[in-house]
Amino acid sequence: SMLDVSIRISVMDLMLKLAERLDVSYLYITHDLAVARYMCDRIAVMYLGKIVELAPTEDLLANPMHPYTKALLSAVPVPDPSYKRPPVEIKGGISKSINPQPRCRFYDRCPMAREDICGPQDHPPLEEKAPDHWVACYLVDKQSA
């Protein structure tokens, strides 16, 4: 990420060409969602070491379901000045990542958190909420947007 933009694009293009030619896959770890969109067929969003959402790239970016994914996407600038993406506020500070509480990792910061549902249970498992779209959240319904 510290490379000049043109060099970075050249390196990414080379990686994509090699992946196709050699029939290999990459595990590409980034905080840059634009780069993830360019490089990846699927995106897994992690929070404090747990995958909270996993889906094909375009589906995840067009239809984020987990509150953390929604917050991440709301922070990405949109080049169209007439389009105003509604901001998603995340509260508080990051929970401790070593020996975390036995509940959803995003609980302390989640705008949807409910103590009766999210607090007393372990971190939610990934569940298929839409075709090939997996989310770890007790409050996201199937086919939710």
Image: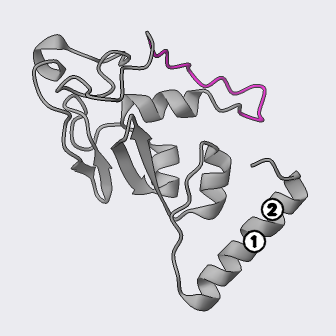
Q: Is residue 76 left or right of residue 63?
A: right
Is 30 located above or below residue 138 in the figure? below
Q: CA distance from mark 1 to mark 2?
A: 6 Å
- Write down the region rendered in magenta: 78-91
Q: Is-magenta flag for residue 81?
A: yes
Q: Residues within 10 Å of mark 1 (few under 14, many from 20)?
A: some
Q: Residue at x 71, y 31 (%)?
A: 77
- Helix, strand or loop at label 1? It is helix
Q: Residue at x 28, y 51 (%)?
A: 130
Give the image location of residue 132, x and y in percent.
31, 59
Say which mark, if any, is on residue 13.
1
- Helix, strand or loop at label 2? It is helix
- Residue at image mark 2: 9
Q: Is-magenta flag for residue 34?
A: no
Q: How many marks?
A: 2
Q: Is residue 90 left or right of residue 31?
A: left
- Are the residues at dot 1 and dot 2 in contact (C-beta closer than 8 Å)? yes
19 or 141: nearer the viewer: 19
The kind of residue on which mark 1 rests is Asp
| Secondary structure mainly formed by the magenta segment | loop
Hey, which quadrant is residue 142 in on the image?
top left
Give the image location of residue 135, x and y in percent.
29, 43
The kind of residue on which mark 2 rests is Ile
108 or 65: nearer the viewer: 108
Give the image location of residue 56, x and y in percent.
44, 59
Q: Residue at x 38, y 16 (%)?
A: 109
